[in-house]
Image: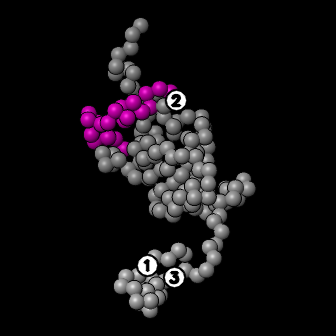
Amino acid sequence: MATTRQEKEAPAVSCEDCGARCCRYVATQIDTPTSKRDYDYLRWYLLHRHVNVFIDHGGGWFIEFETPCEQLGEDHRCTGYETRPDICRQHGIGDTDCEFHGATEPYKMRFKTAAALEAWLDRRGIDWRFKPRGGRRVKPADRDQAAGDRGDSESTCQPC
């Protein structure tokens, strides 16, 4: 027996049950971190408000921005339903397509703060910290003064 397009598009679960959680964030996959620089970038992301990093159950790493869709109404329904993007049309069609209605949490691991990521890395023995650089940091005013003492017309950037 053939199914109609409408039957295929009907969500297996009610979107009202969770308050349209999938419409309240955007996530994109990032490279799996392998270096101190990569971990430093993750820390930097997490120092920003409403930004998270997570690992999915397949081991993929993602950066997540907690920001609601502009078309999400107060009633948790799409105000632009008829013209919504295809990614929205396809989401939640199958029983396992909605990450929030499965038997497990959608994240294998989720970090909301740099401190949480750092603690997780430490527990795993991952060397993520940069060693302090030698010498002192030069303040811009000191650098300008030093350039003036040398007779340079413009200050030059010195390695820290």
Q: Residue 116, which numbered label?
A: none
**Looking at the rendered structure, which numbered label has been put on residue 156?**
1
Residue that appears at 46% across and 39% down: 17
Q: Which of marks 3 and 2 is nearer the N terminus?
A: 2
Q: Earlier in the sequence, mark 1 or mark 3?
A: 3
**Figure quadrant of the N terminus:** top left
CB within 8 Å, label 1 to label 3: no
- Kindly state the secondary structure of the residue where label 1 is placed: loop
Is 148 situated above or below 133? Answer: below
- Dominant secondary structure (helix, strand or loop) of the stretch shown in magenta: loop
Q: Could you tell me residue 144's position as x and y percent?
A: 42, 86
Q: Position of residue 5 (x, y in %)?
A: 34, 19
For discs 3 and 2, the disc positioned in front in the rendered view: 3
Q: Does the magenta stretch include residue 144?
A: no
Question: For the point 34% across and 32% down, which residue is it?
Answer: 86
Q: Nearer the viewer, residue 103 or 86?
A: 86
Mark 2, Cα crowd under 10 Å, few <14 / some 14-19 / many 20+, is some
Between the C-alphas of marks 3 and 2, the distance is: 55 Å
Find numbered disc 3 in the image and state the secondary structure of the residue it sits on: loop
Residue for badge 3: 138
Q: Which amino acid does label 1 sit on?
A: Thr
List x then y, in percent, for residue 130: 63, 66
